[in-house]
Image (cartoon, grey):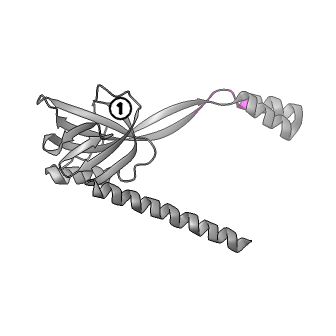
């Protein structure tokens, strides 16, 4: 039985690898050099809603957002990855803590658990953004900003590849700045 489970696991693993490789080959056949999944739009495109999920594609001569909006590389000035700290306030669960305290220590535990749930809990969160500074089709300076929603894996590589292709040297962002 354990052998069958192990074989099924191996088959599933190999199948997943096959799908990933096939997808990468398909993107390469279309001329896509790099792809950023799991990005959220923040600002810079009138037709998109803030928070909308987008996929960024890097081609040899352009950057494409969802394969709908296109920026030719010759109009891109630089691409910057930066982070911002966010402080989230989260309510503690009075009811949940009272119930747990009651289960563990009886009525007195319920009272103490409920009291410990009063107030807020602070949580620091680091957000990672990708900014593309470019000249729009009318020749005006513009900026697109995207939020990495899941992981920052590949974000620096995407930005560095574009900057290398256009000959831009990105500045290291060490402090907050207005966008």
Q: Residue at x 11, y 30 (%)?
A: 139
Graded by Cα atoms within 10 Å as few (under 14), some (14 to 19) or many (20 or more), the crowding at tag 1 reads some
Q: Is residue 117 magenta?
A: yes
Residue 54: % across, % down:
37, 39
Choose top left, top right, bottom left or bottom right for residue 114: top right
Q: Residue at x 79, y 37 (%)?
A: 100
Which residue occupies the foreground of this view, 15 or 2? 15
Please say whether residue 83 is visible from this viewpoint. no
Q: Is residue 16 magenta?
A: no
Choose top left, top right, bottom left or bottom right for residue 81: top left
Q: Quadrant of the N terminus?
A: bottom right
Residue 141: % across, % down:
16, 31
Q: Quadrant of the C terminus?
A: top left
Q: Which residues are magenta?
A: 115-121
Q: Is residue 3 above or below residue 142?
A: below
Which residue occupies the foreground of this view, 160 or 2? 2
* Circle 1: element type: strand
Please say whether residue 2 is visible from this viewpoint. yes
Residue 60: % across, % down:
19, 52
Which residue occupies the foreground of this view, 55 or 173? 55
Q: Is residue 141 left or right of residue 30?
A: left
Choose top left, top right, bottom left or bottom right for residue 11: bottom right
Q: Residue at x 39, y 46 (%)?
A: 37
Which residue position holds label 1? 42
Q: Is residue 92 left or right of residue 74?
A: right
Q: Residue at x 31, y 35 (%)?
A: 145
Please, which residue is most extreme toward the right here?
Answer: 106
């Amino acid at each position: 039985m354990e052998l069958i489970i192990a074989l099924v696991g191996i088959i599933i693993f190999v199948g997943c690898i096959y799908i990933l490789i096939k997808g990468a080959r398909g993107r390469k056949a279309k001329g896509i050099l790099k792809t950023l999944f799991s990005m959220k739009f923040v600002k810079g495109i009138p037709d998109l809603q803030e928070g909308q999920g987008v996929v960024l594609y890097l081609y040899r001569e352009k950057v494409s957002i969802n394969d709908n909006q296109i920026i030719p590389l010759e109009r891109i000035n630089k691409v910057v990855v930066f982070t911002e700290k966010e402080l989230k306030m989260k309510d503690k669960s009075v009811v949940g803590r009272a119930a747990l305290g009651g289960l563990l220590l009886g009525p007195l535990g319920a009272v103490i658990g409920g009291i410990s749930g009063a107030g807020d809990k602070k949580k620091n969160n680091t957000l990672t953004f990708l900014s593309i500074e470019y000249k729009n089709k009318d020749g005006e300076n513009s900026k697109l900003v995207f939020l990495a929603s899941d992981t920052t894996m590949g974000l620096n590589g995407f930005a560095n590849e574009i900057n290398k292709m256009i000959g831009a040297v990105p500045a290291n962002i060490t402090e907050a700045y207005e966008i």
